[in-house]
Every structure is written in C-alpha cells, then in structure tokens.
Amino acid sequence: MIYRLIILTGDRRGEQITVTEEPMTIGSGATCDVRIIDPEMAQTHAEITHQPGGPTIHDLGSMNRILVNHREVRQSVIKHGDLVELGRTRLLVQAYVQAEVEAGEEGERRRKWRPVVIGVAVLLLILLIPLTCRWRPAVPPPPVPVSVPTPPPRIKVVPGAPQASRVVPPVPAPPTASNAPVQSVVPASNSVPRPVAEITQGSPTGQVAARIVSGSNAVTSTTTADVATAAARYPAHDEGAERAAQEVELAQAATAVAESKARALLVQVKDHLDEGDLDEAERILTEVFWFRPDFPPALEQRARLLERRGRLGDARRQWESLAALTNAETVALAKAEISRIDAAREAAKPPAPAKRLRIDSVELSKFPETAAFHEMRLLTVRLIPTAEVMPDTGEVKVEVVFYERDAVTGAVAPAPDRGPREAVAVDGAWHEGEAKVVSASYTIPASASTNRSTAFYGYVVRVLHHAVLQDATAQPRDLLPKPVPDAPAAPPREPAGRPGAD
C-alpha cells in the first residue's frame, strides 16, 4: 500500500506528497524532506517511518504539538482518512494502490499515441468517400396500383324514421304529410327470402312506421295503415336480442350455482380455521376463488387466514380491498378490522434502540486542479456522542456515497469509483464530550477522459453503530432515500385445473 499526504492549508494547499519507504522528516527547516513554511512549525517537527502496523508519525521534540484527528499525540500510526495537524498546517492521509500509479502512466502513453490514431482514421475516411459515392443501390420500380371493384351496397330507406345503424346512405327526404305514401326500395336479388316486418318507433308523426323487405325488385307504394297491417301479419323478430337475452339468463343461472358452491365450501374453510388446520383451509379457499374470484365472504376468510399465518400486512391490504366495496355492512366490518390490525402491529413493534451518535457538522472543500487530478474534493464529517453510554470501540462506521449528474440526460446516479468503496471505520475509544472526525475524498484522476458528460452533484452520509443507523445527511437533501411503501397483497393463487363437482 502506498500512502500520500495532501496539504489542506497554507500556500501549498492541494499539493500531494508521496510517503517514501525511507524515513521522511517534516518541518520548516531547509534540511527537511518536506519543508513547509509555517511560523508555528519547528525546524524538524515530525518524522514519518514505516512500521509493521503501518506508517507512523513521531514528534521530534518540538515545542508545538502534533494532532491526529484532533487528539494530541507523541507517536501514532496513521491510516487512510486521518487528519494530521502540524502547527497551523493540516495534512490529509490518503492510501492508494500501485494500480493508480500505473493507470497514470498508461494514460500518458495513450495521450502520446492519440494523434497517430486520429491521423490514421482520417486517412481511411478520405479513401472510403470516393468508393461510397460511386456505388448506388438498385431501386425497384414502384408497384402498380390495382383497383378492386366494390359491389354496390344494399339500400333500405324508411321515410320519417330516425337514423339507425341498419339504415345506410340516406335518400332525399319524403313528404311529411301523415297520409303520404311510404316507399321501400330494394335492389334485385336472386333469392326470395321470407318477408320480415321491422318496426321503428319514434317517427316524426308519432305513428309506427314499418319496413317490408322482400326479394322483389319492384317499388311498392303503401299507406301507413297498410304498413301496420303488414307488421301485424309478420311480427318483429331480432335474433341478436333474443340470443343476448338467453345468454343473460344462462349467466345468471351459472352465477347462482357458483355462489351456492362457494358458500358450501366456505363453511368447510371456517371449520378448518377453527381447528387450526390452516393448510387445508387455504386449499379449499383456493377452490372457492376458482368459482367466485371476487366473492366478498371468501375475501373476508382469506384476510383472517393471512392474519392467522402472521402476515398482518397482507391481511390489512385484503381488508382494504373489502373496504372499497359498496355494501355498508362489509365496509364497516373491514374498517374495524383494519383498526384492530394497526393497533396489533403497533404493539408488536420492538422499542427503537437509543441512538448514541449524531452528525455535528459536514464540510466540503474543493481543491485546484493539479497534474495528478482533474478534480478533487474533500468531505470532512464531525461526529459527537449523544448518550451517556459511549459507542463501542470499532463498531462505528461511516458510509459516504458521492453522486454525479449527467448534463445530457439530467440523470443523477452514484459514483462509487470517485470515493470510498466501503464504509470508513472510526477507531479509538470514545470519551464523553469528545468529537471524532472522518474524511472522504472525491477524485477524478488526470488520466480520465476530459470529454465526460457527468459532473459532481452531491453526497449522502450515513452513520452506523452495530449496523444500526444513527444519523444521516445529504446535499442536496432530496438524495436521502424516501420510505418504501408496503407491497400490495398478492392475488389468490389459482388451481392448476378445474376442481371436480361434488
């Protein structure tokens, strides 16, 4: 693991210093490996050496102190994210793997070869353009339109009757006198069907107009009295209406049979529920739903079955579907059951664990662009205990997620490669009134493409103690996750085949 120091304050703000394998001295003197001009820093203030436990900073006997994460030390192991203060200068410790160094070298090599690749691509494009212009695809001749003659429609005219779906393009209006003759125009036909009298109510004269349709091609003139006589001789007959009436009667009979069968099965369901045989009750209830999928008594028994199985959320949603019905008695029962389930769920909730930590402050800093990074931001989170019982050592973790926004689509998404890839552990014992600081950096290396359409948008910080959320914050606030509503109740399962009749 390779470590580096990032200077956060002073004239050298944003500069990065790699921690070498050899001992490295820090101070304001000219002989130091890292010289920082600071009036409160000694000539040789501190030294960093590599130890088995990691890089260690030592105080070289300076009059001023060394602070690591706001605590005064004489010697301390430093790790990723630690904040070191020497005099007035603040340094951030950051760990990075060798792959990042190699990635920078690889990016440098790619930038050297980029003009050559672009030149070759342009040359190929110039060579392909003349070939493309010479080639022309064969265009097939347009299809020849074919006209299909349309047979003339059969025209039926009823003078004085309102327009109906069985009457096609109208003819000039007939005389309006009540005793005017009524004409029926019928095209020639090879077959001679049985005469049919079609009665049309609501004529302009308030009388009954009738159409007599025959197979003759003659034009017949008749009076209203003659039409009434013909209508009496040939009564009105509508096969579609008669068929619909028969289907309604059959559907009503089938519904009555299905409801009778469902009620008989529900008696068995209730008996099995009383006996505690929930599996058999559910099997029979599934058979009931095959006969009547939306039968309210069956939905009521299903809600009680779900509650017996401990699925209070599903049971509540089943009662909600019943509360949406129009039957007043069913609605009142459903609302009473919903209130009872809510009270039971509230009483069954375990007491919320006492929170021991909270976020005191969050500071976000942006550094100037350097040779190593296009962009770099530092997020510093300050935590303080809130309870008399201090947090357990090593059980406090801070999750930091940075977000980026696409300038083209406007979509906002996490950027895991730009920040810490796992939660940051807070080490060290906690003391009453003591604050601890955790930092995380958002970085875009110089080797990354400069044509990126995404840009920094914000962050989310979550503090956990024993994996229990203690506090959370975000910037902007809409990045905080919203509560997820309960999922809708699952529909009743359908049997594989139709159950046999009793």
Image (cartoon, rainbow, N blue to C red):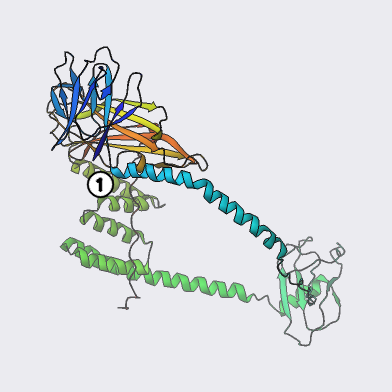
Q: Is residue 496 visible?
A: yes
Query: Which residue position holds label 1?
Result: 341
Q: Residues within 10 Å of mark 1 (few under 14, many from 20)?
A: some
Q: Nearer the viewer, residue 74 or 43?
A: 43
**Left or right: residue 43 compared with residue 219:** left
Among the 4 quarters of the image, the one containing residue 288:
bottom left
Snapshot quadrant of residue 275: bottom left
The quadrant in which the C terminus is found is bottom left
Specify the quadrant that holds the N terminus: top left
Q: In percent of the image, x 19 and y 30: which residue is there?
A: 23
Left or right? Give the position of 345 relative to 324. Answer: left
Residue 267 visible in image:
no
- In the rendered image, residue 421, in percent from the top left (x then y), is placed at 29, 42
As displayed, is residue 277 above or below residue 311?
below
Q: Does residue 47 appear left or right of residue 113 in this picture?
A: left
Front residue of 45 and 71: 45
- Taking the spot 33% from the left edge, 38% from the top edge, the residue there is 419
Query: What amino acid does circle 1 point to?
Result: Ile
Q: Residue at x 35, y 32 (%)?
A: 474
Q: Position of residue 422 (x, y in %)?
A: 26, 42
Q: Position of residue 261 (x, y in %)?
A: 33, 71
Q: Quadrant of residue 382?
A: top left
Where disc 1 sits, the SS reads helix
